[in-house]
Image (cartoon, grey):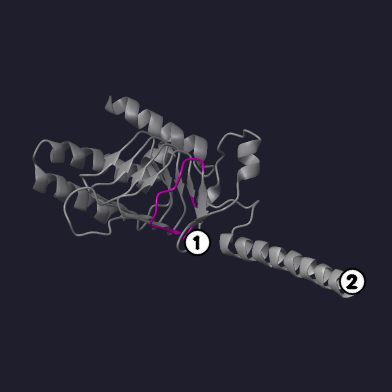
């Protein structure tokens, strides 16, 4: 089972990272893979009641990789942590399969209370560099979190969000065309409006212009009578 996990994770790196030129390079030089291996050991100790052993193993992994994954976190298959430095995954975080995280991502909590307080990340989600996903919220399958976004509310499946606080960007053309979710580097699409607030303001401006034109036409009609 461990060998299957290692093989499919290394293959995922090879398929999704153009900088990965060989399986041996991934095994030796990718801290994201090393961090996940440390987490698997820490998690095994944690669930068997060796709490201190799990935390210490996690701490060693953090020192060696710069990636902090709490042993209580649940991680799915083929997780990729690209570059990795500064990634933090909290105790009650849950990650699905084929999740892609960039450096300085935080999956953090917003409460000091015990219990579920960290995000649940669906399958095939990309979280861009510097993004913060905070609280016991759910990020749906195939979602994209743009670089440096701050997400404090649930994100539906197949949705791309950017900004502070994060807001959806328009990917309706892709959805209507039935296109499969694609890989957006750093979770940030480059072929659509990346400023949802500006888009809304432009829509309001267009509506205001149309309203002014209608009022002007009505005024001319009234004057002509």
- Which residue appears farthest toward the front when viewing the image? 225
191 in magenta: no
The residue closer to the viewer here, 96 or 71, is 96
Which quadrant of the structure image shows residue 78? top left
- The answer to whether residue 167 is left or right of residue 9 is right
Which residue is the site of mark 1? 163
Name which residue lies at 60% across and 50% down: 170
Give coordinates of residue 191: x percent, y percent: 66, 51
- Which residue appears farthest toward the right when viewing the image? 224
- The answer to whether residue 215 is left or right of residue 8 is right
- The answer to whether residue 222 is left or right of residue 156 is right
Residue at disc 2, secondary structure: loop
Name which residue lies at 45% across and 56% down: 129
- Label 1 Cα crowd, 10 Å radius (few <14 / some 14-19 / many 20+): many
The residue closer to the viewer here, 189 or 67, is 189
Of circles 1 and 2, the one toward us is 2
- Label 2 Cα crowd, 10 Å radius (few <14 / some 14-19 / many 20+): few
Mark identifier at residue 204: none
Relative to residue 80, is residue 4 depicted above or below?
above
- What's the distance in space between the residues labelled 1 and 2, CA to CA? 51 Å
Give coordinates of residue 113: x percent, y percent: 17, 56
Q: Which residues are magenta?
A: 145-158
């Amino acid at each position: 089972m461990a060998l299957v996990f290692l093989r499919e994770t290394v293959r995922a790196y090879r398929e999704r990272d153009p900088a990965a030129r060989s399986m041996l390079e991934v095994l030796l030089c990718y801290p994201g893979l090393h961090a996940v291996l440390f987490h698997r050991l820490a998690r095994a100790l944690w669930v068997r009641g060796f709490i201190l052993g799990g935390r210490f193993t996690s701490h060693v992994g953090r020192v060696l990789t710069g990636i902090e994954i709490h042993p209580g976190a649940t991680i799915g298959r083929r997780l990729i942590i690209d570059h990795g430095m500064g990634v933090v995954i909290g105790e009650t975080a849950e990650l699905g399969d084929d999740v892609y995280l960039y450096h300085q991502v935080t999956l953090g909590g917003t409460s000091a209370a015990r219990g579920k307080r960290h995000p649940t990340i669906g399958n095939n989600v990309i979280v861009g560099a510097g993004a913060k996903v905070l609280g016991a919220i759910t990020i749906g399958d195939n979602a994209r979190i743009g670089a440096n976004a701050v997400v404090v509310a649930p994100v539906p499946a197949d949705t791309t969000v950017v900004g502070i606080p994060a807001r959806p960007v328009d990917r309706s053309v892709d959805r209507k065309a039935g296109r499969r979710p694609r890989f957006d580097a750093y979770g940030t699409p480059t072929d659509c409006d990346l400023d949802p607030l500006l888009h809304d303001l432009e829509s309001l401006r267009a509506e205001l212009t149309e309203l002014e034109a209608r009022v002007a036409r009505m005024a001319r009609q009234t004057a002509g009578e």
